[in-house]
Amino acid sequence: MSVTLSDQDKLTLRTAAYGAVTLMAAAAGGDSPHKVATQGSIALTTGTGLVGHVLAEKSSPVGDLSGKSAAEIADRVLPALTAAVQLLKKQAPEEADNFRSTVLVAVEASARSPKGGPGPTLTATVGKITAALDAA
């Protein structure tokens, strides 16, 4: 069975996944947010299945991930993560776990970027992202 997602559905998935990486970079603070974001983004491009195809689409829009603080970014990203898993559970149930694991690989890759491993802020952010994914 082939699943066709609407452009809005794809936007939701991309915003949630890339938003998780953006939130990790914001939480990195002085621990090289650029490296955190790079490692997470690279990890997202290794996704497979329908999720991998959606995340790998070139020149595709991503929702607004800007914010003056990690809290502002989290206000958009955490609900988007829950919405993305809910969307997949409804439209492509076999892809919901794939999305969850793809995002978690990306945030774990992000968390490993700083020298000396993840600090408490990155560890806490991983926990919040995991909770949002599991809330669906």
Image: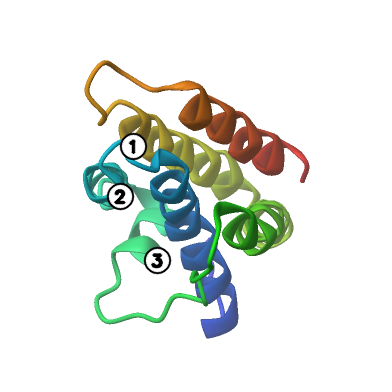
Residue at figure coordinates x 65%, y 64% from the top left:
76
Residue at position x 25%, y 42% from top?
Answer: 32
* Residue 134 placement, left or right of 77: right
Whether residue 4 is visible? no
Callout 2: SS: helix
Q: Which residue is rendered at x = 37% and y = 30% of the image? A: 111
Q: CA distance from mark 3 to mark 2?
A: 19 Å
Residue 33 coordinates in the image, percent (x, y): 30, 47
Q: Earlier in the sequence, mark 3 or mark 2?
A: 2
Q: Secondary structure at mark 3?
A: helix
How crowded pointer 3 is (Cα within 10 Å; few <14, some 14-19, many 20+) is rated as many
Q: Residues within 10 Å of mark 2 (few under 14, many from 20)?
A: many
**Which mark is first along the chain, 1 or 2?**
2
According to the image, label 1 marks what residue? 110
Between 34 and 15, the residue placed more toward the observer is 34
In the image, farthest residue toward the front: 30
Q: Amino acid at mark 3?
A: Val
Query: Mark 3 sits on what residue?
Result: 54
Say if residue 104 shows up in the picture.
Answer: yes
| Residue 15 placement (x, y as % from top left) | 51, 66
- Which amino acid type is marked by label 2? Ala
Q: CA distance from mark 1 to mark 3?
A: 20 Å
**What's the amino acid at mark 1?**
Ser
Q: Position of residue 75 (x, y in %)?
A: 69, 60
Residue 135 point in image, percent of width and height:
78, 41
Task: Identify the residue shown where x is 63% and y is 62%.
Answer: 72
Q: Where residue 37 is drawn, which disc sits there?
A: 2
